Image (cartoon, rainbow, N blue to C red):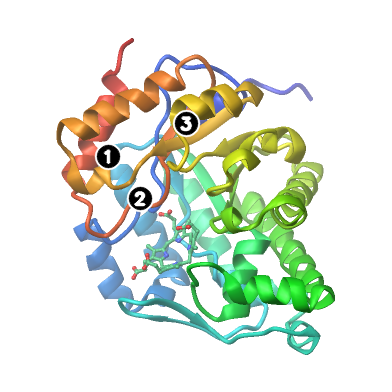
């Protein structure tokens, strides 16, 4: 079998091609800043019911593609479905965020379900992927995703989002065996989950390590880089050629060499580092994604145009997928998203 060169722009960038105009998509592109998302969510009931309803989850995934013509669609789901599939209780408190049952020792880890059991809960997500791979326009790439083990563990340990991930750091230092067992369990579940998404039609997968920035030194290597490497290796062994995007958010110097060490095809960059720095230190190894501050989607105007052009120009000499540095927020103006896309697509030298 001979490999054929990809034609979709996102896949070309991930294969290392420098394109005259970077392909573009946006983290949280299906979300509360869009009136059509809010309408479908109201129809579904709550957020989790939307995640587990394949027809409606596919519908909200398609909404930003119809409205803006993004080059990629990202499966609509959440990183916290994996803990739920492993047996954690999960619910969302409106205006506050996720809540989960907590764990902090080996008894808690051993009470989790075995990895094989996750598909009982997660099979509706695979159905969403199947619907999307039928319904997306031919030029649009379908991205599947999961949370990285460290980020998922921070929620499973604390039972909620935490500003400094202190409960997870306390377990990492105070109960290292149980912590390692938890990371291993999530890593194994993530490999199975992403593998099923790929079987169902995901063309790229992204690993979100939103809290990587609070791991320093050896802990960063062991709990952010190493799980990303393991997941990438397992997926590429099972699905040769599948591109992987890694997002060790706020890793700072940890971004340097991350793609080389994990064999990820692309590193997504947050906006705490400048695009010029990332071009010099990270894009040297291959494709990067990012990194416009999502606050511009709220404020708009000439500052948005200038910052967007700066990102495009900084990454112009290598493979680049344009994105925000983190997810778009509910207070964003949909008009500003249109202005960002127009600016990216019209930016010449
Ligand atoms: O990007 C997309 O459009 C795809 C869908 C997606 C969601 N969450 C939908 C969502 C993706 C890729 C995620 C990832 C996710 N979820 C992360 C990693 C990326 C990041 O943002 O750092 C994390 C940490 C979560 C966990 C999570 N889910 C939190 C902390 C919250 C509450 C905060 C908030 O924005 O309300 C969610 C809820 C959530 N996930 C919403 C959406 C659209 C909002 C829920 C709603 O409709 O009320």
Residue 173 shows up from this direction: yes
Compared with 34, 168 (above or below) is: below
Ranked by sequence position, the earlier of labels 1 and 2 is 2
- Asked whether disc 1 touches disc 2, contact meaning CB atoms under 8 Å apart, the reply is yes
Q: Residue at x 42, y 43 (%)?
A: 325
Report the residue marked by disc 3: 321
Task: Tell me the tag on residue 17.
Answer: none
In the displayed image of the protein, which residue is found farthest to the right?
Answer: 177
Ranked by sequence position, the earlier of labels 1 and 3 is 1
Q: Residue at x 54, y 64 (%)?
A: 79
Label 1 crowd bin: few (<14), some (14–19), many (20+), radius 10 Å? some
Compared with 27, 139 (above or below) is: above
Q: Is residue 78 left or right of residue 264?
A: left
Q: Position of residue 142 (x, y in %)?
A: 50, 44
Report the residue marked by disc 1: 68
Between the residue at mark 1 and the residue at mark 3, the CA separation in whole angstroms equals 16 Å
């Amino acid at each position: 079998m001979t490999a054929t060169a990809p034609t979709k722009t996102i896949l070309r960038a991930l294969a290392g091609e420098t394109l005259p105009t970077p392909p573009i998509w946006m983290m949280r592109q299906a979300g509360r800043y869009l009136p059509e998302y809010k309408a479908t969510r109201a129809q579904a009931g709550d957020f989790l019911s939307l995640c587990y309803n394949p027809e409606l989850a596919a519908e909200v995934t398609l909404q930003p593609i119809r409205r803006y013509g993004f080059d990629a669609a990202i499966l609509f789901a959440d990183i916290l479905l994996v803990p739920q599939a492993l047996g954690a209780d999960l619910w969302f408190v409106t205006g506050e965020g996720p809540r989960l049952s907590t764990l902090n020792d080996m008894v808690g880890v051993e009470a989790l379900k075995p990895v094989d059991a996750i598909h009982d809960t997660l099979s509706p997500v695979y159905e969403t992927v199947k619907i999307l791979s039928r319904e997306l326009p031919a030029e649009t790439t379908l991205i599947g995703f999961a949370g990285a083990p460290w980020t998922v563990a921070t929620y499973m340990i604390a039972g909620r989002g935490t500003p400094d991930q202190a409960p997870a750091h306390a377990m990492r230092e105070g109960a290292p065996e149980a912590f390692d067992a938890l990371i291993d369990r999530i890593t194994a579940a993530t490999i199975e989950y992403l593998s099923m998404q790929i079987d169902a039609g995901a063309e790229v997968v992204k690993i979100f390590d939103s809290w990587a920035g609070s791991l320093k030194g050896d802990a960063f290597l062991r709990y952010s880089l190493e799980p990303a490497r393991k997941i990438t290796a397992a997926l590429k062994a099972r699905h040769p050629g599948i591109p992987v995007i890694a997002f060790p958010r706020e890793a700072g110097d940890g971004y340097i060499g991350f793609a080389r060490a994990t064999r990820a095809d692309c590193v997504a960059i947050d906006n705490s580092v400048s695009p010029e720095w990332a071009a010099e230190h990270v894009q040297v190894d291959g494709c990067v994604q990012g990194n416009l501050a999502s606050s511009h989607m709220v404020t708009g105007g000439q500052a948005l145009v200038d910052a967007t052009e700066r990102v495009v120009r900084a990454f112009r000499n290598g493979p680049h997928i344009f994105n925000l540095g983190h997810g778009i927020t509910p207070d964003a103006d949909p008009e500003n998203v249109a202005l960002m896309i127009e600016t990216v697509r019209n930016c010449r030298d």
